[in-house]
Image: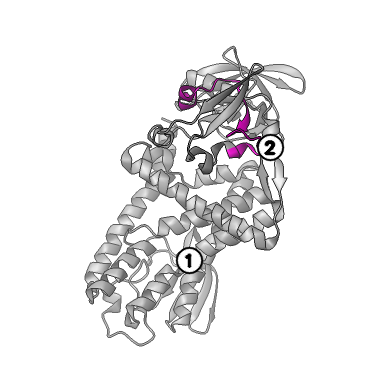
């Protein structure tokens, strides 16, 4: 049942986003009086072969456009007349262009049509995050809740922090929200410092002048984390935790004999036993239970922790939610850009950073939670916008590059070049799809 709920949420979320993305292209084309032959959710052919297994689960022609639901549950498309894409090649467009064709329109109009899907995904992401902010508010951790102190990483230790330190002041002033510890105003300020209570003694810990460089070079954000007692939240289906019998609300007491009262202690214990199967003692309904759980090579077992520190909620009106929601939406794109930067610089693994439908479904989870559903759907909307803007032929970004070239150079690439570029782009995309759908999943079992 959990698998069906995961798959159902993923299918619904992606269907909404694909439909809105394609509607962006469709609406822009209609506005410029470009003929749209088809508007389909999913493909009515065996993607990417438009002439193979052509049938739809539902279709209806209204005016010049056929609207339908395809049988192949992967993406969707609009067939814009006079445009080289997965449904039309250069040969099919050998006749003279007609006034209502895509290729007959000025480059700036074609550019807007190609950006229509990306713009729609961005608008969707902003609306979703704004609505979530207005409805649920914004959670934060009060500084008073961090009563067990903090745990530093290597950079935090170099600064002078020790496990169990309680941060009581920032720049000599009390603070109310723990995230103020990471405030850019503090970390970029002159002569900034933290005051900590260490076993009843107050100590000042200054922020080094080269702190931001060290933070960036070592990727040490955050340099301190709250010591938080926790219980098991959602267990990832098929993970080592699930196979070992870990359950929601279990409290992990020890890993391989090492106490794990706080989540950072658990992370440390798991990393020390990466690639091993270890005894994990949990408290379940007040009774001790010992499980044998496999830890993967990255030191993970596959569950979401549920902190026992109580968060507070900041509420917003609808007008106040818009800038907050917009910032959250674009924060997803910023994260994606940083992730790609790490991949290209060799600081992150491509195979571990790229996820497919299985990973997406697991993120949605085996229980239907509307807040979680819309949060993930909003994130996916911004990710789709970012991915589609990549300058790869066959993606919207590839078309945008060619159109910008045409606008700058004053001449368009030939239809044959566009068709060949489309084929190259499709090979790249299909290769990536084959990797995330098949190869990556097979490698997990080898």
Quick check: 218 above or below 18? Answer: above
User: Which residue bears the numbered disc 2?
Assistant: 142
Image location of residue 441, percent across then percent down: 44, 39
Image location of residue 392, percent across then percent down: 32, 58
Is residue 273 visible in the rendered image? The answer is: no
Quick check: 51 above or below 66? Answer: above
Quarter of the figure with residue 303:
top right
Magenta extent: 154-180
Label 1 secondary element: helix
Image location of residue 179, percent across then percent down: 60, 39
Q: Find the residue positioned furthest to the top.
A: 257
Image location of residue 431, percent across then percent down: 34, 49
User: Which residue bears the numbered disc 1?
Assistant: 119
Label 2 secondary element: loop
Residue at (71% x, 52% y) in the render = 315
In primary-sequence order, the first of circles 1 and 2 is: 1
Callout 1 environment at 10 Å: few (<14), some (14 to 19), or many (20+)?
Answer: some
Where, quadrant-wise, is the C terminus in this rendering? top left
Residue 392 relative to residue 202: left or right: left
* Magenta segment includes 129: no
């Amino acid at each position: 049942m959990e698998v069906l709920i995961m798959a159902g949420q993923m299918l619904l979320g992606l269907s909404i986003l694909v439909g809105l993305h394609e509607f962006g292209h469709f609406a822009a084309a209609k506005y410029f009086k470009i003929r749209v032959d088809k508007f389909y959710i999913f493909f009515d052919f065996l993607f990417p072969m438009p002439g193979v297994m052509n049938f739809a689960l539902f279709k209806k022609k209204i005016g010049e456009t056929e609207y339908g639901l395809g049988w192949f549950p992967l993406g969707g498309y609009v067939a814009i007349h006079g445009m080289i894409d997965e449904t039309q090649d250069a040969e099919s467009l050998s006749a003279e262009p007609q006034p209502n064709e895509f290729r007959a329109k000025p480059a700036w109009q074609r550019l807007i049509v190609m950006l229509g899907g990306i713009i729609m995904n961005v608008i969707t992401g902003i609306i979703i995050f704004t609505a979530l902010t207005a409805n649920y508010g914004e959670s934060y951790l009060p500084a008073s809740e961090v009563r067990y102190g903090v745990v530093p990483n290597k950079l935090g230790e170099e600064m002078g922090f020790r496990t169990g330190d309680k941060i009581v002041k920032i720049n000599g002033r009390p603070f109310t929200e723990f995230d103020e510890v990471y405030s850019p105003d503090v970390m970029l300020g002159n002569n900034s410092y933290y005051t900590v209570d260490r076993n009843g003694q107050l100590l000042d810990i200054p922020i080094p002048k080269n702190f931001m460089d060290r933070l960036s070079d070592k990727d040490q954000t955050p340099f301190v984390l709250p010591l938080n007692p926790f219980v098991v939240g959602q267990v990832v289906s098929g993970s080592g935790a699930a196979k070992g019998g870990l359950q929601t609300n279990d409290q992990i007491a020890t890993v391989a004999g090492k106490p794990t009262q706080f989540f950072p202690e658990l992370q440390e214990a798991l990393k020390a036993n990466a690639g091993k199967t270890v005894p994990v003692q949990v408290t379940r309904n007040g009774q001790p239970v010992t499980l044998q759980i496999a830890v993967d090579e990255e030191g993970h077992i596959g569950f979401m922790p549920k902190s026992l520190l109580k968060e507070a909620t900041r509420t917003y009106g609808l007008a106040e939610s818009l800038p907050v929601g917009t910032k959250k939406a674009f924060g997803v794109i910023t994260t994606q850009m940083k992730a790609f930067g790490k991949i290209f610089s060799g600081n992150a693994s491509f195979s571990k950073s790229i996820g497919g439908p299985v990973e997406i479904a697991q993120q949605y989870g085996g229980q239907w939670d509307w807040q979680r559903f819309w949060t993930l759907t909003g994130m996916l909307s911004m990710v789709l916008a970012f991915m589609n803007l990549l300058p790869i032929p066959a993606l919207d970004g590839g078309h945008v590059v060619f159109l910008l070239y045409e606008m700058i150079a004053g001449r368009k690439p030939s239809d044959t070049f566009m068709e060949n570029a489309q084929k190259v782009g499709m090979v790249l995309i299909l290769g990536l799809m084959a990797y995330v759908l098949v190869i990556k999943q097979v490698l997990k079992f080898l």
